[in-house]
Every structure is written in structure tokens, then in C-alpha cells.
Amino acid sequence: MSAMSCISEDQGANSFVLAMFYNNVLSIPILLACTVFLENWSSENINANFPVDRRNNLIIAMVFSGLSSVFISYTSAWCVRVTSSTTYSMVGALNKLPIALSGLIFFDAPVTLPSVSAIGVGFVSGIVYALAKVKQGSKPKTGVLPTTNQPMSASSQSARDSLKS
């Protein structure tokens, strides 16, 4: 069992906050390692990238960007908690279709059969998924899989009940 599923089961409603927290904390060592080993930390480079006249505005923009990313991570975890990870993934895939379509319409992207058919398949898959979710929501929830709810004789049910107690 993964650590996140243990946290989700133990913490209940706060699990999505913890998921957001751990996802952000896990990125810190990677970012620190990259900045220490790959960036030029000389004073000339810092002054060139952070001029004194614009330094405060750049720092405010970086803080705003960081807070925005935390908010996006929080809302993503909340969306997964409220719906499902499959729905969240499907929405993430479907939100790229209008962008691809606008690229074909407004920009100089070549309109080919593979590109148009890929966008069409994407839209159809979104419709199929939505219809499946609606159909799934209309079914009564029994709590057991359909294959485990087999009809059985009274003597078999009696023997099964005696084993449970």
C-alpha cells in the first residue's frame, strides 16, 4: 500500500491538504539541487538578472507565482477528492482539445487527416466517458461486485452465515 493511500485513509477530509503538501515538499530537493549545481550564483549574474530598480517587483512576482502554484496544487487535490482521479485525468486530457482545435483554426498549423481525427477521437472519448459516468451514477450502489452476489440455495446461505459468526 502506498504512503499516500495510507495518509488518505487515516486523515479523512484533510488527506487532500496533505497530498498537496507532500507533492510540493517532494519537489524542493530537486529544485535545490538543480539551482545549486546548474545556476550561476555570481554577483554579476544576480545583478544582471535582478536589477536593483526592478528587484522588488521581480521578488513579488516570484512570491505570487509560488502561491499560485500552491493554490493550483490544492485545487487539484481537492478535485481528485471530490470526483475521482480518472475524472481529473480525463478533464486534464480534454482541456487540450480546444487548444489543439484553435491551433488548427487560428494559427498556421497544417490541417491533416491525423490531426483532425485525433481531435475528433478525443471529443468522442470525452462524450463516451461522460455518458458512462451518468449511467454509473444512475445505478444503485450495492457495495459488492456483481460477480460476488450470486444467487444460492437456502442451505448454502445458511452454511455461509454460520461460518461468518
Image (cartoon, grey):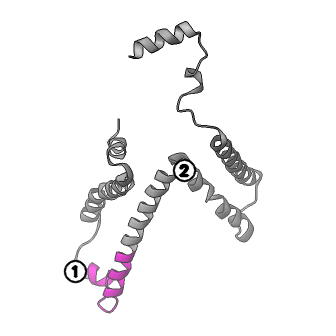
The residue under the point 67% across, 49% down is 130
Count of numbered marks: 2
Which residue is farthest top? 155
- The region drawn magenta spans 45-64
User: Residue 156 in the image: x percent, y percent?
Assistant: 53, 8
Q: Label 2 sits on what residue type?
A: Ser
The extreme bottom residue here reads: 53
Name the kind of residue labelled 1 in the image: Ser
Question: Considering the numbered disc 1 on the image, is that residue within a helix, a strand or a loop?
Answer: helix
Choose mark 2 or mark 1, whichever is in front: 2
Residue drawn at x 64%, y 45% as measured from the top left: 133
- The dot on residue 81 is none
Q: Nearer the viewer, residue 80 or 61?
A: 80
Res 165 → quadrant: top left
**Left-right relation of 68 to 53:** right
SS class of the residue under badge 2? helix
Q: Measure the alpha-carbon separation of dots 2 and 1.
A: 44 Å
Q: Magenta stretch: dominant SS?
A: helix
The reply, left or right, for residue 103 in relation to residue 76 is right
Rendered view: 90 above or below 1: below
Which residue is drawn at the image coordinates 54% and 46% (left, top)? 86
Q: Say which residue label 1 marks.
A: 43
* Residue 3 % position (x, y): 32, 42
Say left or right for 49 vs 145.
left
Q: Which residue is mark 2?
A: 89
- Judge left or right: residue 61 versus residue 116: left
Residue 118 x/y as whole percent = 70, 50
Q: Is residue 61 above or below residue 39?
A: below
